[in-house]
Amino acid sequence: MARPHERRKIFVCLLFAALAVGLSLFAAGETTQQNALRGLAKRGVEQLSRVANLEGDAGERLAGEALRVQITQDGGPRWVRDELLKVLVDNPFLEPSDATQNALRVEIVSDMNTIVLQLHLYRRGWVVRGAEPFRVRVMPWVPTLVMALAAVAALVRRRPVLGLVMAGVLGQVLLLCLPSESPFVTRSWSDEVASGPLLAFMDGVGRGPQGAAMGAGILVFCLMLAVFDHHRSRGKVGSMTLRQTGWVAMLVAIGGLAWVDCSARTSWFASLGGWQGNLVLLLLLCAWMPAIHGSWERRHG
């Protein structure tokens, strides 16, 4: 039977977890949709710049100056054009202008939980577009739910590593089971992950030597944390060997990346632009505090 202070920890964890999940159901508002669309538009403009031969392999501008385009919108709310303008301000290859015959047509299809974006560039009688439209789900409650369940599991088992791995696996499984209401053909799980925001970001960062250096730095950082943790807990009851600690660090990295991918594909990070998303993040951190404290007690108690 659980002791009184352990029951209090479980109650606090369940309370904050339930509040986080309940509030996340209301975090898919207009602010989240705008941030999610801005991310899609950025990826779409970058792809269009490469397809239209405006950007070189090394990211350089092939033309002498940015191509001036007039934005036209097909479908979607009125703020779509404003979000696209914000993206073009930071893009060195396309420049918004009303005094040109070149057109950048943005096509939006959206429903309750999915936004689909397709960009078309009309230039000198040619129409250029990407291979397929970009899409993102607006379902921030999914990563919130799995992270809340993971916090409870980590507290009960006193193993935060188990919670992180559980959050990543459950998030991917839940996304796989939830059908998309997009009018386009449903893609496989591997295609969804491959075209998701996380791998797109890693692909952008990974170009050139700086990407390889960053990847090597992250790997070395994880190994150093594993070694330090092993030396700190060596000789204590229940301590792990260096090999076991390395495997735990790898599981944490895999589970964390799986949850980050789930969060990116459901606009959880986009929801942090509003007060609901920030409050959900705070509640999740509070839900995890008892689990982290319980793990510390197990190691040092």
Image: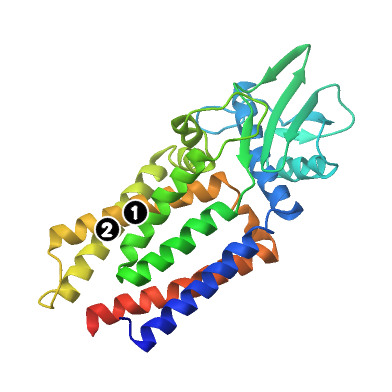
Q: Position of residue 283 (x, y in %)?
A: 56, 71
Note whether 299 is above or below 89 in the view shown: below
Instruction: State the separation of the CA atoms marked 2 and 1.
Output: 6 Å
**Residue on which the image places disc 1:** 253
Q: Label 1 sits on what residue type?
A: Ala
Observer-nearest of 1 and 217? 1
- The residue closer to the viewer here, 88 or 227, is 227
From the viewer's perspective, is residue 90 above or below residue 280? above
Look at 42% across and 55% down and name the residue there. Answer: 167
Q: Is 95 left, or right, of 287 in this rendering?
A: right
Q: How is the image coloured?
A: rainbow
Tell me the SS state at disc 1: helix
257 sits to left or right of 187: left
* Secondary element at tag 2: helix
| Quadrant of res 8 | bottom left
> Seen from this angle, which residue lies furthest front?
1
Task: For label 2, count other residues whose C-alpha is less than 10 Å away and answer few (under 14), some (14-19) or many (20+).
Answer: many
Residues under numbered marks 2 and 1 in contact, where contact means CB atoms less than 8 Å apart: yes
Q: Quadrant of the N terminus?
A: bottom left
Q: Is residue 235 above or below residue 276?
A: below
Farthest residue to the bottom: give it.
4
Looking at this view, is 2 or 55 the one in front? 2
Residue 54, x across and y down, in percent: 64, 25
- Residue pointed to by mark 2: 249
Place of residue 216 in the rendered image (x, y in percent of width and height, measured from the top left): 31, 49
Rendered residue at 73%/15% (across/down): 127
Rendered image: mark on residue 274: none
Q: Is residue 180 left or right of residue 68?
A: left
Outermost residue toward the right in this view: 99
**Residue located at (15% from left, 73% from top):** 238
Q: Is residue 197 above or below residue 104?
A: below
Nearer to me, 67 or 108: 108
